[in-house]
Image (tube, rainbow, N blue to C red):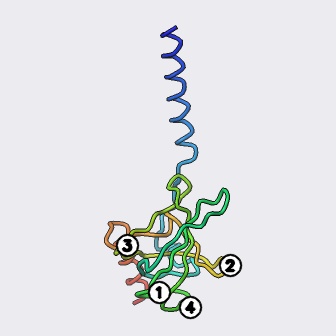
């Protein structure tokens, strides 16, 4: 009986590994050719955040203070919606962190996710900020 339990346990672990890869998020690289496609591009930080309890959406709503806007008409504050589950390309924004946000308009919100939100002090954030400033010149 213990041999059957071991085989079942290995099958369960293998099935979990396969399903994790199947739902993992992957992003297209943002580069010089597509960096200006999003409707909004800005740097900001979370002023306020709260979870939205919508069935099967697993989203968070945040109020961002905009520090610098590169594209799109945007005010001093903007409501941002993003999925919070990393396996669904979600992101959990942290307080006191400046983010470079690439987003689109959606029912009064700017919608984004892990593929469009980068801490400005991360390697990817610095690379994209450098690319934006080069294109703006």
Q: Nearer the viewer, mark 2 or mark 3?
A: 3
Of the numbered discs in the image, which one, if any, rests on residue 32?
none
- Mark 2 packing: few (<14 Cα in 10 Å), some, or many (20+)? few
Instruction: Identify the residue shown where x is 41% and y is 79%.
Output: 45
Q: Label 4: which residue?
A: 73
Image coordinates for residue 57, horizontal then vertical, percent: 64, 60
Q: Which residue is mark 1?
A: 70
Q: Residues within 10 Å of mark 4 (few under 14, many from 20)?
A: few
Image position of 23 (left or right of 98)? right
* Separation (CA) of disc 3 from disc 4: 24 Å
Residue tagged 3: 95
Q: What whole-number distance in Å separates the C-alpha atoms at marks 2 and 3? A: 25 Å
Q: Earlier in the sequence, mark 1 or mark 2?
A: 1
Q: Are marks 2 and 4 in contact (CB under 8 Å)?
A: no
Q: Nearer the viewer, residue 1 or 29?
A: 1
Q: Residue at x 56, y 91 (%)?
A: 73
In the picture, the disc for residue 107 is: 2
Eye-nearest disc, 3 or 4: 3
CA gap between label 1 and label 3 equals: 22 Å
Residue 106: quadrant of the picture: bottom right
Q: Callout 1: helix, strand or loop?
A: strand
* Residues at marks 1 and 2, CA–CA distance in whole angstroms: 21 Å
Quarter of the rendering occupied by the C terminus: bottom left
Q: Nearer the viewer, mark 1 or mark 3?
A: 3
Q: Are marks 2 and 3 in contact (CB under 8 Å)?
A: no
Look at 42% across and 88% down and name the residue there. 68
- Label 2 secondary element: loop
Q: CA distance from mark 1 to mark 4?
A: 9 Å
Task: Tell me if residue 103 comes above or below residue 23 in the rendering.
Answer: below
């Amino acid at each position: 009986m213990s041999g059957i339990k071991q085989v079942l346990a290995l099958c369960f672990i293998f099935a979990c590994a396969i399903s994790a890869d199947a739902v993992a998020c992957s992003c297209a690289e943002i580069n010089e050719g597509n960096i200006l496609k999003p409707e909004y591009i800005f740097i900001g930080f979370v002023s306020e955040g709260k979870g939205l309890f919508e069935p099967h959406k697993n989203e968070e709503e945040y109020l961002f203070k905009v520090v610098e806007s590169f594209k799109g008409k945007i005010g001093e504050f903007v409501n941002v919606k993003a999925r919070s589950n990393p396996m669904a390309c979600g992101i959990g924004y942290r307080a006191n962190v400046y983010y470079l946000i690439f987003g689109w308009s959606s029912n009064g919100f700017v919608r984004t996710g892990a593929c469009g939100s980068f801490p400005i002090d991360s390697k990817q954030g610095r690379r994209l900020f450098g690319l934006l400033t080069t294109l703006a010149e």
